[in-house]
Amino acid sequence: AQSVSQHNHHVILSEAASLELGCNYSYGGTVNLFWYVQYPGQHLQLLLKYFSGDPLVKGIKGFEAEFIKSKFSFNLRKPSVQWSDTAEYFCAVTPYGNNRLAFGKGNQVVVIP
Amino acid sequence: DGGITQSPKYLFRKEGQNVTLSCEQNLNHDAMYWYRQDPGQGLRLIYYSQIVNDFQKGDIAEGYSVSREKKESFPLTVTSAQKNPTAFYLCASSIDPRAAGNQPQHFGDGTRLSIL
């Protein structure tokens, strides 16, 4: 079964700082990759996804992620965070054609105004 | 608006009682899922169903049961056999990946279950 690793569970940074959250997975075949975000008091929602094609994908609210197949990584980035980016971020992976998502443990991000 | 409705939002039960969590979707999705979310643990898959009258165990199915009699509904029963049932439970749905390739899952607002 695939597994997903997210490091630095708690991240605290100031507004306008850059954010990068690491995601590594273990699965040798073709995968689909997702980043989900959970804002305080809200439901989990899709931030961005990678299925195929350009390994640099852009999502909502200025987020982007880069799929590096050789490193089994799908890191999330935002050049300049805002207070409203305070949330928990989850990386998820599934083998192609199988929707059994494996989630990482999440990154709790707090942006200080 | 289309979406996933989980009810109730908060649920309290005495130890030893079975409890059923509701999940309804009007997105016309074939596949539905149940996850458990614990602090610092991420989401773990309990059960999933890709079509009516069919469901499969996820990674932590012990102590849980489900049914899928209707496309719109996928209730989860937390039985007395579940050793540590207090958690946040999330339901999700998606287009059947076997028909359309992988599709993002849409999530409900969750049910927070507390065992007294």
Image (tube, coloured by chain):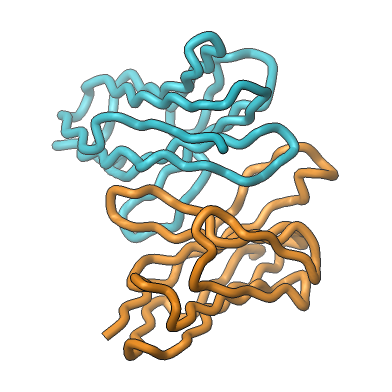
Q: In this view, does A113 lie to the left or right of A28?
A: left
Q: In this view, does A23 lie to the left or right of A46?
A: left
How many numbered markers are drawn? 0
**Residue furthest top as drawn:** A70
Residue placed at 24% from the left, 31% from the top? A8
Quadrant of residue B9 in the image? bottom left
Q: Which of the pair A87/B84 is nearer the observer?
A: B84
Above or below — where is A9 with respect to A19?
below
Pinpoint residue A44: horizontal percent, then vertical percent: 46, 52
Q: Is residue A61 above or below residue B76?
A: above
Q: Where is residue B23 in the image (x, y as percent from the top left)?
A: 59, 73
Q: As drawn, is A13 to the left or to the right of A70?
A: left
Residue at the (38%, 48%) spot, across then down = B42
- Provide the letter of the chain coloured cyan: A
Q: Residue most toward the right?
A: B99
Which of A40 and A69 lies nearest the eye of the viewer? A69
The quadrant the N terminus of chain B occupies is: bottom right
Q: Name the colour assigned to chain B in the rendering.
A: orange
| Residue at (61, 36) in percent of width and height | A94
Q: State which quarter of the image contains the C terminus of chain B.
A: bottom left
Instruction: Provide residue A113's location: percent of width, then percent of height.
Output: 14, 36
For residue B38, what is the image quadrant?
bottom left
Residue at image position (41%, 25%) is A76
Percent x, y of residue A69: 56, 13
